[in-house]
Image (tube, rainbow, N blue to C red):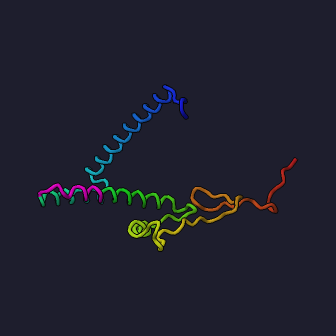
Amino acid sequence: LPGKFSGKAFLATRREYKLYSVHIKTLLKKMMNDLLAWKQPLLSSYLFWGWMHCVYINSMRMVPPYVCGFLVLLMSKNYYRMKKRDENSLFTPLTPVDLFLALLFGGSNSNRIFMQPISVESRRSQDVYADSGTMISPPSESTAVAPED
C-alpha cells in the first residue's frame, strides 16, 4: 500500500534477507562438503567424471552442460524424495515422462495434451486420516456410548 511502508518494516525485511543469505551459504557449504566426502555417490561421481572429461579435452566449454545436468540431477533427486514422502497424499503427482513430453511438445496451441489434470480423490468430511495415510473411521452412532450421569 502506498505510504504504509515504515522504517521498521524495512529493517525487518533487511534482517530477513540477511538471515536467508546466511542460511543459503550454510546449505551450499554443507552440500559441497557432502559432495567432496562422497556422501551422495551419484552426484559426486557425476561431478568427478565431468571434471575429468573437461581435463581430458583440455577445455572449459563442457562446464555449462555439466552444471545444467547437475541441476537436473538435484531437482530429480528432490522430486523423487518428495514423491516418496507424499505417497499417502490424496493426489497423484505428474510423472517425469509427463513433464518431459509437456516440455518438448506441450503448449497453448498444441492439440495433444501431455499433462493430465491432477486427480484428487474425494472423501467424506467426517473421514479422519492418520499420519500414515490410513483412514480412522469415526465411531458410528449405533456404537456410540451415551455419557453416564
Left or right: residue 42 compared with residue 48: right
Left or right: residue 149 compared with residue 109: right
- Magenta residue span: 58-69
Q: Is residue 68 magenta?
A: yes
| Image location (x, y in percent) of residue 101 | 41, 70
| Image location (x, y in percent) of residue 118 | 54, 65
The residue positioned farthest toward the top in the image shown: 7
| Image location (x, y in percent) of residue 48 | 21, 57
Q: Quadrant of the N terminus?
A: top right
For residue 22, above or below residue 82: above
- Which residue is pictured at 21% across the width and 60% down the height? 49
User: Residue 22 or 102: which is nearer the viewer?
Assistant: 102
For residue 59, above or below residue 17: below
| Image location (x, y in percent) of residue 141 | 80, 60
For residue 55, above or below residue 92: above
For residue 13, above or below residue 96: above
- Which residue is pictured at 54% across the width and 66% down the height? 117
The residue positioned farthest toward the right in the image shown: 149
